[in-house]
Amino acid sequence: MPQLDTSTWFITIISSMITLFILFQLKISMQIFPTPPSPKILATQKTKTPWESKWTKIYLPLLSLQQ
């Protein structure tokens, strides 16, 4: 019974690994990845409070009280 010749296995395995690496690199480079999300600018609405729209005597300057 003849023995199995394993002298070419190293070259075969190395060349297949290089070929697979190149194929995977080409496949990945053709892939289209989504763009990263950009921050969304939220416009905050200012709500009016009841005391902002009223003018009371507390807010009057002190000079007007002296007359």
Image: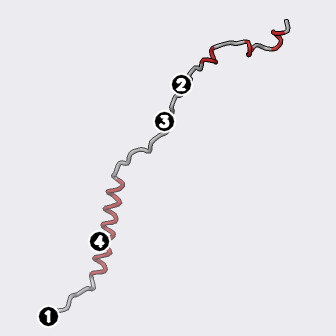
Q: Residue at x 58, y 20 (%)?
A: 48
- How far apart in space, not on screen, are marks 3 and 2 (Cα)? 16 Å
Q: Is the C terminus in the top left, top right, bottom left or bottom right quadrant?
A: top right
Horizontal and vertical percent position of residue 54: 65, 13
- How far apart in space, not on screen, are marks 3 and 4 (Cα)? 48 Å
Horizontal and vertical percent position of residue 42: 51, 31
Q: Residue at x 59, y 20 (%)?
A: 49
Mark 1: which secondary structure? loop
Question: Circle 4 sits on which residue?
Answer: 16
Horizontal and vertical percent position of residue 4: 21, 88
Q: Residues within 10 Å of mark 2 (few under 14, many from 20)?
A: few
Residue type at mark 1 is Met
Question: Circle 3 sits on which residue?
Answer: 40
Q: Nearer the viewer, mark 3 or mark 1?
A: 3
- How far apart in space, not on screen, are marks 4 and 1 (Cα)? 29 Å
Which of marks 2 and 1 precedes in the sequence? 1
Q: Residue at x 38, y 45 (%)?
A: 34
Looking at the image, is 21 positioned above or below residue 59?
below
Residue type at mark 3 is Lys
